[in-house]
Image (cartoon, rainbow, N blue to C red):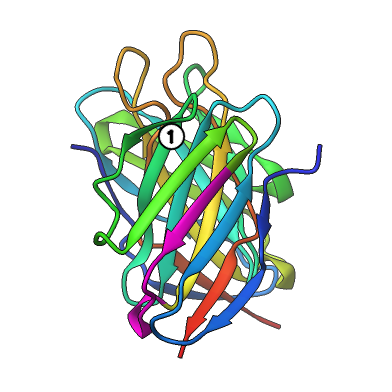
Amino acid sequence: DAGVIQSPRHEVTEMGQEVTLRCKPISGHNSLFWYRQTMMRGLELLIYFNNNVPIDDSGMPEDRFSAKMPNASFSTLKIQPSEPRDSAVYFCASSSKLQGLSTDTQYFGPGTRLTVL
Amino acid sequence: AQSVTQPDIHITVSEGASLELRCNYSYGATPYLFWYVQSPGQGLQLLLKYFSGDTLVQGIKGFEAEFKRSQSSFNLRKPSVHWSDAAEYFCAVGARAGGTSYGKLTFGQGTILTVHP
């Protein structure tokens, strides 16, 4: 299995530009999570999906952030317009709900390091 | 609401010494518990997890953790640390079956481990 795939691995952009981060979860997993990691705030859950449906987006910082999951094998996190304070590492993770359990192991992608100048 | 506390932000040990990283959780019932490790520039990798059964859990790379319900703790241990263990370690808690978390995990702030030769 290829694991969770994220692209790009690094993104440098200027303030005001639109940024789109991409994630391909592990095949067969039905939950997908977007996290943001910074030195100041640690690892923050932004939004997560179950069976392609957004379940909880309370961690999304503001309306400039949006996420979609059009199908089981692809998700995007978009920032428009981007600001310097959005600079962080963004992780995508996926998991598969085991029968009888509501929580299973989350498998993380390598992350996208975003720098907004 | 569930929460995780990792009291130690930074720990330094000598190579070959034993290691214990602390994790305390807050949850209304018996939780699912995880330890992840993050090497610099990498995503999070699962070390071990506790779902049920034996409270002493064995993981990869020689790590183990013990679930102590009375202390609400899930401390990570290793009898002899290797230089390659230098990384950041995250404890996480997830909800049990019957909840509606759909696999959501709550992470601690992380403990950075430095290993001296």
User: Which residue is drawn at the image coordinates 43% and 66% (left, top)?
Assistant: A37
Quarter placement of the N terminus of chain A: top right
Does the segment drawn in magenta span residue B68? no
What segment carries the magenta color?
Answer: A75-86
Q: Chain of mark 1?
A: A
Q: Position of residue A59 (x, y in %)?
A: 28, 52
Q: Position of residue B39 (x, y in %)?
A: 64, 67
In the rendered structure, the answer to whether residue A5 lies left or right of residue B25 reads right
In this view, the residue in front, A93 or B1, is A93
Q: Residue type at mark 1: give it.
A: Phe
Quick check: A66 above or below A48? below
Label 1, on which residue?
A49
Quick check: B51 above or below A74? above
- Callout 1 environment at 10 Å: few (<14), some (14 to 19), or many (20+)? many
User: Which residue is drawn at the image coordinates 57% and 25% (left, top)?
Assistant: A96
User: Which residue is drawn at the image coordinates 61% and 49% (left, top)?
Assistant: A23
> Does residue A92 appear anywhere in the picture?
yes
Does the segment drawn in magenta span residue A83? yes
Quick check: B89 above or below B105? below
User: Which residue is drawn at the image coordinates 57% and 73% (left, top)?
Assistant: A113
> Does residue B107 appear anywhere in the picture?
no
Q: Quadrant of residue B57?
A: top right
In this view, the residue in front, A108 or A60, is A60
Quarter placement of the C terminus of chain A: bottom left
In the rendered structure, the answer to whether residue B33 lies left or right of residue A71 reads left
